[in-house]
Image: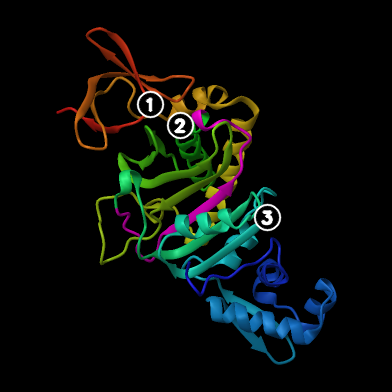
Amino acid sequence: MSSTLRRCRVKTRRSEVASALAAVGSAGLSGQRLAETLGVSRVAIAKHVTALIAAGYDIAAVRGEGYRLVSLPIDLVPVEVERLVTDPLWVCIEGAAETGSTNEDCKVLARSGAEEGTVVVAARQTAGKGRLGREWTSPEGGAYLSALLRPPCAPSEVASFAPACALGVAYGLEALGLHPRLKWPNDVQLDGKKIAGILVEMSAETDRVEWVVAGCGVNVRRSECCFQDGGFVNDVVDASPSMVAAAVLDGLARAYREYLAGGFSAMRDAYEARHTLAGVEVTVRDMTGAIVASGVVEGVDASARLVLSGPDGSVPLVAGEVTLRS
Protein backbone atom coordinates (compact mmCIF):
# COMPACT_ATOMS: atom_id res chain seq x y z
CA MET A 1 0.00 0.00 0.00
CA SER A 2 1.21 3.48 -0.82
CA SER A 3 2.88 5.18 2.12
CA THR A 4 1.02 8.39 1.24
CA LEU A 5 -2.38 6.79 1.68
CA ARG A 6 -4.48 8.85 4.07
CA ARG A 7 -7.45 7.88 6.21
CA CYS A 8 -10.43 10.06 7.02
CA ARG A 9 -13.88 9.61 8.47
CA VAL A 10 -17.05 10.72 6.69
CA LYS A 11 -17.74 13.51 7.32
CA THR A 12 -14.52 14.94 8.71
CA ARG A 13 -14.06 18.50 9.85
CA ARG A 14 -11.94 19.11 6.77
CA SER A 15 -14.74 18.19 4.39
CA GLU A 16 -17.15 20.24 6.50
CA VAL A 17 -14.88 23.28 6.08
CA ALA A 18 -14.85 22.69 2.31
CA SER A 19 -18.64 22.31 2.29
CA ALA A 20 -19.15 25.51 4.27
CA LEU A 21 -16.95 27.50 1.90
CA ALA A 22 -18.58 25.96 -1.18
CA ALA A 23 -22.04 26.81 0.16
CA VAL A 24 -21.36 30.56 0.35
CA GLY A 25 -19.31 30.80 -2.84
CA SER A 26 -17.75 34.19 -3.49
CA ALA A 27 -19.23 35.67 -0.30
CA GLY A 28 -16.64 33.95 1.87
CA LEU A 29 -16.68 33.16 5.59
CA SER A 30 -14.61 34.48 8.44
CA GLY A 31 -12.41 32.10 10.39
CA GLN A 32 -14.39 32.99 13.51
CA ARG A 33 -17.71 32.13 11.86
CA LEU A 34 -16.35 28.84 10.58
CA ALA A 35 -14.96 28.00 14.01
CA GLU A 36 -18.26 28.74 15.73
CA THR A 37 -20.29 26.82 13.17
CA LEU A 38 -18.12 23.70 13.34
CA GLY A 39 -17.31 23.89 17.03
CA VAL A 40 -13.54 24.08 16.68
CA SER A 41 -10.86 26.71 17.23
CA ARG A 42 -9.78 29.28 14.66
CA VAL A 43 -6.33 27.67 14.74
CA ALA A 44 -7.92 24.36 13.71
CA ILE A 45 -9.80 26.11 10.90
CA ALA A 46 -6.55 27.64 9.63
CA LYS A 47 -4.90 24.20 9.61
CA HIS A 48 -7.81 22.68 7.69
CA VAL A 49 -7.73 25.50 5.14
CA THR A 50 -3.98 25.03 4.66
CA ALA A 51 -4.53 21.30 4.10
CA LEU A 52 -7.33 21.97 1.61
CA ILE A 53 -5.10 24.34 -0.35
CA ALA A 54 -2.39 21.66 -0.43
CA ALA A 55 -4.98 19.18 -1.75
CA GLY A 56 -5.85 21.41 -4.71
CA TYR A 57 -8.54 23.81 -3.48
CA ASP A 58 -7.98 27.44 -4.47
CA ILE A 59 -8.90 29.35 -1.31
CA ALA A 60 -8.23 33.05 -0.88
CA ALA A 61 -7.72 34.59 2.55
CA VAL A 62 -8.99 38.17 2.39
CA ARG A 63 -8.29 40.51 5.28
CA GLY A 64 -11.54 41.60 6.89
CA GLU A 65 -13.60 39.08 4.92
CA GLY A 66 -12.15 35.70 5.82
CA TYR A 67 -11.79 32.72 3.53
CA ARG A 68 -13.24 32.54 0.04
CA LEU A 69 -13.34 29.43 -2.17
CA VAL A 70 -12.13 30.45 -5.63
CA SER A 71 -12.18 27.05 -7.33
CA LEU A 72 -12.42 23.34 -6.59
CA PRO A 73 -9.72 20.73 -7.37
CA ILE A 74 -9.57 19.63 -11.00
CA ASP A 75 -8.30 16.13 -10.15
CA LEU A 76 -9.73 13.53 -7.80
CA VAL A 77 -9.21 14.48 -4.15
CA PRO A 78 -10.38 12.22 -1.29
CA VAL A 79 -11.76 15.05 0.83
CA GLU A 80 -13.78 16.37 -2.14
CA VAL A 81 -15.26 12.91 -2.75
CA GLU A 82 -16.04 12.80 0.96
CA ARG A 83 -17.74 16.20 0.73
CA LEU A 84 -19.91 15.20 -2.22
CA VAL A 85 -20.90 11.61 -1.45
CA THR A 86 -24.33 11.35 0.18
CA ASP A 87 -25.06 7.70 0.91
CA PRO A 88 -24.43 6.67 4.54
CA LEU A 89 -23.02 3.30 3.44
CA TRP A 90 -19.68 4.97 2.82
CA VAL A 91 -18.19 5.40 6.28
CA CYS A 92 -14.52 5.91 5.49
CA ILE A 93 -12.84 7.33 2.41
CA GLU A 94 -9.09 6.98 1.96
CA GLY A 95 -6.93 8.01 -0.91
CA ALA A 96 -3.81 9.41 -2.47
CA ALA A 97 -2.93 11.34 -5.59
CA GLU A 98 -1.21 8.21 -6.87
CA THR A 99 -1.17 4.57 -5.86
CA GLY A 100 -0.38 1.25 -7.47
CA SER A 101 -3.89 -0.16 -7.40
CA THR A 102 -6.90 0.95 -5.37
CA ASN A 103 -8.12 -2.66 -5.38
CA GLU A 104 -4.87 -3.88 -3.84
CA ASP A 105 -4.98 -1.10 -1.24
CA CYS A 106 -8.59 -1.90 -0.41
CA LYS A 107 -7.80 -5.62 -0.09
CA VAL A 108 -5.08 -4.80 2.44
CA LEU A 109 -7.64 -2.86 4.47
CA ALA A 110 -10.17 -5.69 4.14
CA ARG A 111 -7.69 -8.22 5.51
CA SER A 112 -6.91 -5.90 8.41
CA GLY A 113 -10.57 -5.85 9.44
CA ALA A 114 -11.74 -2.56 7.92
CA GLU A 115 -15.49 -2.16 8.08
CA GLU A 116 -17.94 -2.35 5.21
CA GLY A 117 -18.21 0.97 3.43
CA THR A 118 -14.48 1.69 3.42
CA VAL A 119 -13.41 3.25 0.12
CA VAL A 120 -10.02 3.87 -1.51
CA VAL A 121 -9.77 6.49 -4.26
CA ALA A 122 -6.92 7.75 -6.41
CA ALA A 123 -6.31 10.32 -9.13
CA ARG A 124 -4.11 7.85 -11.01
CA GLN A 125 -2.83 4.29 -10.69
CA THR A 126 0.54 2.91 -11.70
CA ALA A 127 -0.54 -0.75 -11.61
CA GLY A 128 -4.27 -0.69 -12.28
CA LYS A 129 -5.92 -4.05 -12.96
CA GLY A 130 -8.67 -5.15 -15.29
CA ARG A 131 -10.46 -8.43 -15.78
CA LEU A 132 -8.40 -11.58 -16.43
CA GLY A 133 -5.32 -9.90 -14.93
CA ARG A 134 -5.05 -7.33 -17.70
CA GLU A 135 -3.40 -3.98 -17.09
CA TRP A 136 -5.90 -1.14 -16.73
CA THR A 137 -4.60 2.18 -18.07
CA SER A 138 -5.17 4.72 -15.31
CA PRO A 139 -4.02 8.19 -16.39
CA GLU A 140 -4.52 11.42 -14.51
CA GLY A 141 -7.96 12.86 -15.12
CA GLY A 142 -9.89 9.68 -14.35
CA ALA A 143 -11.79 8.52 -11.29
CA TYR A 144 -10.43 5.33 -9.73
CA LEU A 145 -12.03 3.81 -6.67
CA SER A 146 -12.47 0.56 -4.79
CA ALA A 147 -15.19 -0.15 -2.23
CA LEU A 148 -15.11 -2.74 0.54
CA LEU A 149 -18.35 -4.65 1.02
CA ARG A 150 -19.23 -7.56 3.27
CA PRO A 151 -22.40 -9.07 1.78
CA PRO A 152 -24.05 -11.89 3.77
CA CYS A 153 -24.08 -14.32 0.87
CA ALA A 154 -22.53 -17.55 -0.37
CA PRO A 155 -19.48 -17.48 -2.67
CA SER A 156 -21.58 -18.94 -5.50
CA GLU A 157 -23.72 -15.79 -5.51
CA VAL A 158 -20.82 -13.42 -6.19
CA ALA A 159 -20.77 -14.30 -9.90
CA SER A 160 -23.71 -11.92 -10.32
CA PHE A 161 -22.02 -9.18 -8.31
CA ALA A 162 -20.01 -7.63 -11.16
CA PRO A 163 -23.07 -7.03 -13.38
CA ALA A 164 -24.89 -5.63 -10.34
CA CYS A 165 -21.98 -3.23 -9.74
CA ALA A 166 -21.98 -2.23 -13.41
CA LEU A 167 -25.63 -1.28 -13.00
CA GLY A 168 -24.66 0.76 -9.94
CA VAL A 169 -22.04 2.65 -11.95
CA ALA A 170 -24.71 3.33 -14.57
CA TYR A 171 -27.00 4.70 -11.86
CA GLY A 172 -24.24 7.08 -10.78
CA LEU A 173 -23.44 8.29 -14.29
CA GLU A 174 -27.13 8.80 -15.00
CA ALA A 175 -27.32 11.08 -11.96
CA LEU A 176 -24.75 13.27 -13.73
CA GLY A 177 -26.91 13.49 -16.85
CA LEU A 178 -25.29 10.74 -18.94
CA HIS A 179 -27.03 7.88 -20.73
CA PRO A 180 -24.70 4.90 -20.28
CA ARG A 181 -25.23 1.41 -21.63
CA LEU A 182 -24.02 -1.90 -20.21
CA LYS A 183 -21.98 -4.57 -21.96
CA TRP A 184 -22.04 -7.87 -20.10
CA PRO A 185 -20.50 -8.70 -17.76
CA ASN A 186 -18.95 -5.54 -16.36
CA ASP A 187 -18.32 -2.83 -18.94
CA VAL A 188 -20.10 0.51 -19.05
CA GLN A 189 -20.30 2.29 -22.40
CA LEU A 190 -21.20 5.73 -23.65
CA ASP A 191 -22.19 6.08 -27.31
CA GLY A 192 -20.72 2.64 -28.00
CA LYS A 193 -17.37 3.43 -26.37
CA LYS A 194 -16.13 2.04 -23.07
CA ILE A 195 -16.27 4.66 -20.35
CA ALA A 196 -15.88 2.49 -17.25
CA GLY A 197 -14.91 -0.99 -16.15
CA ILE A 198 -15.47 -2.96 -12.96
CA LEU A 199 -13.22 -5.51 -11.27
CA VAL A 200 -14.72 -7.52 -8.41
CA GLU A 201 -12.44 -9.54 -6.12
CA MET A 202 -13.38 -11.48 -3.01
CA SER A 203 -12.21 -13.59 -0.10
CA ALA A 204 -14.47 -16.40 1.00
CA GLU A 205 -14.73 -19.47 3.17
CA THR A 206 -16.61 -22.60 2.12
CA ASP A 207 -20.07 -21.28 2.85
CA ARG A 208 -19.76 -17.53 3.20
CA VAL A 209 -18.13 -14.47 1.70
CA GLU A 210 -15.67 -12.72 3.99
CA TRP A 211 -15.37 -9.59 1.89
CA VAL A 212 -15.81 -8.24 -1.62
CA VAL A 213 -13.78 -5.42 -3.15
CA ALA A 214 -15.57 -3.71 -6.03
CA GLY A 215 -13.14 -1.66 -8.08
CA CYS A 216 -14.13 0.83 -10.75
CA GLY A 217 -12.27 3.07 -13.16
CA VAL A 218 -14.10 5.82 -15.04
CA ASN A 219 -12.74 7.91 -17.91
CA VAL A 220 -13.51 11.50 -17.00
CA ARG A 221 -11.14 13.90 -18.76
CA ARG A 222 -9.15 13.14 -21.89
CA SER A 223 -5.41 12.85 -21.42
CA GLU A 224 -3.05 13.72 -24.27
CA CYS A 225 -0.69 10.88 -23.37
CA CYS A 226 -3.21 8.06 -23.41
CA PHE A 227 -5.93 6.30 -25.41
CA GLN A 228 -8.44 8.48 -27.23
CA ASP A 229 -10.92 5.87 -28.47
CA GLY A 230 -12.82 5.43 -25.21
CA GLY A 231 -15.80 7.36 -23.93
CA PHE A 232 -15.22 10.25 -21.53
CA VAL A 233 -17.58 11.93 -19.08
CA ASN A 234 -16.35 15.40 -20.03
CA ASP A 235 -17.29 14.83 -23.67
CA VAL A 236 -20.89 15.18 -22.50
CA VAL A 237 -21.03 16.94 -19.13
CA ASP A 238 -18.72 19.16 -17.10
CA ALA A 239 -17.91 17.13 -14.00
CA SER A 240 -14.70 16.76 -12.02
CA PRO A 241 -13.25 13.32 -11.23
CA SER A 242 -14.28 13.86 -7.59
CA MET A 243 -17.87 14.55 -8.65
CA VAL A 244 -17.86 11.42 -10.79
CA ALA A 245 -16.40 9.27 -8.01
CA ALA A 246 -19.00 10.50 -5.52
CA ALA A 247 -21.86 9.91 -7.97
CA VAL A 248 -20.58 6.42 -8.78
CA LEU A 249 -20.28 5.57 -5.08
CA ASP A 250 -23.86 6.66 -4.47
CA GLY A 251 -24.98 4.61 -7.47
CA LEU A 252 -23.08 1.58 -6.19
CA ALA A 253 -24.73 1.95 -2.78
CA ARG A 254 -28.17 1.98 -4.42
CA ALA A 255 -27.36 -1.14 -6.44
CA TYR A 256 -25.90 -2.89 -3.38
CA ARG A 257 -29.11 -2.37 -1.43
CA GLU A 258 -31.15 -3.70 -4.33
CA TYR A 259 -28.84 -6.71 -4.51
CA LEU A 260 -29.15 -7.43 -0.79
CA ALA A 261 -32.93 -7.06 -0.92
CA GLY A 262 -33.63 -9.37 -3.85
CA GLY A 263 -30.46 -10.58 -5.53
CA PHE A 264 -29.69 -9.89 -9.16
CA SER A 265 -33.12 -11.20 -10.17
CA ALA A 266 -34.65 -8.06 -8.66
CA MET A 267 -32.25 -5.93 -10.73
CA ARG A 268 -32.54 -7.86 -13.97
CA ASP A 269 -35.11 -5.59 -15.63
CA ALA A 270 -33.05 -2.49 -14.84
CA TYR A 271 -29.92 -4.16 -16.22
CA GLU A 272 -31.69 -5.41 -19.36
CA ALA A 273 -33.09 -1.93 -20.04
CA ARG A 274 -29.51 -0.69 -20.35
CA HIS A 275 -27.93 -3.78 -21.93
CA THR A 276 -26.37 -3.15 -25.31
CA LEU A 277 -25.92 -6.76 -26.50
CA ALA A 278 -29.51 -7.98 -26.81
CA GLY A 279 -30.13 -9.32 -30.32
CA VAL A 280 -26.46 -9.02 -31.28
CA GLU A 281 -24.43 -11.93 -32.67
CA VAL A 282 -21.36 -12.48 -30.48
CA THR A 283 -18.49 -14.82 -29.73
CA VAL A 284 -17.57 -15.58 -26.12
CA ARG A 285 -14.05 -16.70 -25.18
CA ASP A 286 -12.56 -17.96 -21.93
CA MET A 287 -9.47 -16.50 -20.26
CA THR A 288 -7.17 -18.54 -22.54
CA GLY A 289 -8.80 -17.10 -25.66
CA ALA A 290 -10.57 -20.32 -26.59
CA ILE A 291 -14.08 -19.93 -27.99
CA VAL A 292 -16.70 -21.04 -25.49
CA ALA A 293 -19.83 -20.25 -27.47
CA SER A 294 -21.19 -18.19 -30.35
CA GLY A 295 -24.70 -17.06 -31.08
CA VAL A 296 -27.24 -14.29 -30.82
CA VAL A 297 -27.67 -12.74 -27.38
CA GLU A 298 -31.13 -13.41 -25.96
CA GLY A 299 -30.44 -11.39 -22.83
CA VAL A 300 -29.26 -11.75 -19.26
CA ASP A 301 -31.08 -14.16 -16.95
CA ALA A 302 -32.04 -13.83 -13.28
CA SER A 303 -28.62 -15.18 -12.24
CA ALA A 304 -26.80 -12.56 -14.36
CA ARG A 305 -25.75 -15.17 -16.91
CA LEU A 306 -25.48 -14.12 -20.55
CA VAL A 307 -27.90 -16.24 -22.57
CA LEU A 308 -27.09 -17.03 -26.20
CA SER A 309 -29.36 -18.60 -28.76
CA GLY A 310 -27.37 -21.47 -30.23
CA PRO A 311 -28.11 -24.31 -32.68
CA ASP A 312 -29.08 -26.57 -29.77
CA GLY A 313 -31.15 -24.03 -27.88
CA SER A 314 -30.36 -21.42 -25.23
CA VAL A 315 -26.85 -21.42 -23.77
CA PRO A 316 -26.32 -19.64 -20.40
CA LEU A 317 -22.78 -18.38 -19.70
CA VAL A 318 -21.45 -17.41 -16.28
CA ALA A 319 -18.31 -15.63 -17.48
CA GLY A 320 -16.32 -14.85 -20.58
CA GLU A 321 -14.93 -12.23 -22.92
CA VAL A 322 -17.54 -11.04 -25.41
CA THR A 323 -16.70 -9.80 -28.90
CA LEU A 324 -19.11 -8.83 -31.66
CA ARG A 325 -19.11 -11.09 -34.70
CA SER A 326 -18.42 -9.27 -37.95
Q: CA distance from mark 1 to mark 3?
A: 32 Å
- Residue at the (22%, 9%) spot, across then down: 311
Where is the C terminus found, in terms of image quarters? top left
Which residue is located at x 57 percent, y 58 percent?
109
- Whether residues under marks 1 and 2 lie with C-beta atoms below 8 angstroms apart, the answer is yes
The tag on residue 159 is 2
Q: Nearer the viewer, mark 2 or mark 3?
A: 2
Residue found farthest to the top:
312
Q: Position of residue 223 (x, y in %)?
A: 31, 64
Residues in magenta, as a range: 135-156
In terms of secondary structure, where does tag 2 sit? Answer: helix
Query: Who comes first in sequence, dot 2 or dot 3?
Result: 3
The amino acid marked with disc number 3 is Val
Q: Amino acid at mark 1?
A: Val
Judging by the rendered image, the residue that carries numbered circle 1 is 318
Q: Is residue 270 above or below residue 187?
A: above
Instruction: Residue 61: say if magenta.
Output: no
Instruction: Mark 1 or mark 2: name the one nearer the start of the chain.
Output: 2
Residue position for label 3: 91
Which mark's residue is nearer the viewer, 1 or 3? Answer: 1
Q: Report which quarter residue 193 is drawn in.
A: top left
Q: Is residue 299 above or below residue 83?
A: above
Position of residue 110 measured from the top left corner of the image (x, y, whole percent): 57, 53
Crowding at mark 2 (Cα within 10 Å: few <14, some 14-19, many 20+): some
Q: Residue furthest left?
A: 326
- Check disc 1: other Cα within 10 Å, few if <14, some if 14-19, many if 20+: few
Q: Position of residue 222 (x, y in %)?
A: 33, 60
Q: Amino acid at mark 2?
A: Ala
Q: Residue at x 45, y 50 (%)?
A: 216
Q: CA distance from mark 1 to mark 2?
A: 7 Å
Disc 3 secondary structure class:
loop
Viewer can see residue 238:
no
